[in-house]
Image (tube, rainbow, N blue to C red):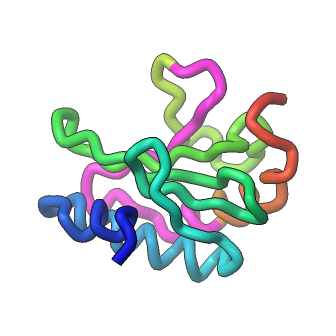
């Protein structure tokens, strides 16, 4: 098993369930992504470039899904968190009930179309 999968499977609930659901959604929506373990986090790459990552904040009680090319995203920006970050945007989930799969998949699809543009605008 790779370290990214270990990271996901070794989380406490509700984080583990959230991460597993997110993993399924990412991999079915963008089947060409590759799951790696970078920066001590599960990090998806698309065509050799960073795509998105999962980060569990146990202290604050959420899972963050950060999008590498978030400066170029155009859908559901009102649902994304920037919190003290200049460029990076993320979707944040405190429990499974917070997750709107349709919104998440639309953001993944948008990120897929702009991933080639890189981190900065």
Q: Which percent across, then down, holds residue 16? A: 23, 66
Which contiguous range is marked in magenta?
85-105
In the picture, measured across the screen, residue 50 lies left or right of residue 36, that is: right
Which of the 4 quarters of the picture holds residue 89?
top right
Residue at x-position 55% and y-position 62%? 104
Whether residue 77 is situated above or below residue 14 in the rendered picture: above
Look at 25% across and 57% down and name the residue there: 95
State the count of labels.
Answer: 0
Residue 119 located left or right of residue 45 = right
The front one of 100 and 25 is 25
Residue 50 in the image: x percent, y percent?
66, 51
Q: Quadrant of residue 27?
A: bottom right
83 lies left or right of 87:
left
Q: Quadrant where the N terminus lies?
A: bottom left
State yes or no: residue 96 in magenta. yes
Q: Would residue 38 be counted in the magenta stretch? A: no
Q: Where is residue 109 in the image (x, y as percent from the top left)?
A: 72, 65
Q: Quarter holding the C terminus?
A: top right
Q: Where is residue 18 in the image (x, y as percent from the top left)?
A: 31, 64
Q: In this view, does 1 lie to the left or right of 27?
A: left
Front position in the image: 83 or 118: 118
Residue 68 quadrant: top right
| Position of 65 relative to 6 (above/below) | above
Farthest left residue? 12
**Rendered residue at 45%/71% (across/down):** 23
């Amino acid at each position: 098993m790779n370290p990214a999968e270990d990271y996901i499977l070794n989380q406490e609930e509700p984080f583990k369930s959230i991460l597993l659901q997110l993993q399924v959604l990412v991999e079915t929506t963008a089947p060409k992504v590759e799951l790696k373990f970078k920066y001590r986090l599960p990090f998806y790459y698309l065509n050799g470039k960073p795509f998105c990552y999962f980060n569990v904040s146990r202290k604050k009680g959420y899972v963050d899904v950060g999008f590498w090319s978030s400066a170029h995203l155009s859908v559901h920006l009102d649902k994304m968190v920037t919190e003290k970050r200049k460029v990076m945007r993320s979707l944040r989930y405190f429990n499974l009930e917070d997750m709107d799969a349709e919104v998440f998949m639309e953001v993944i699809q948008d990120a897929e179309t702009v991933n080639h543009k890189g981190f900065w605008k």
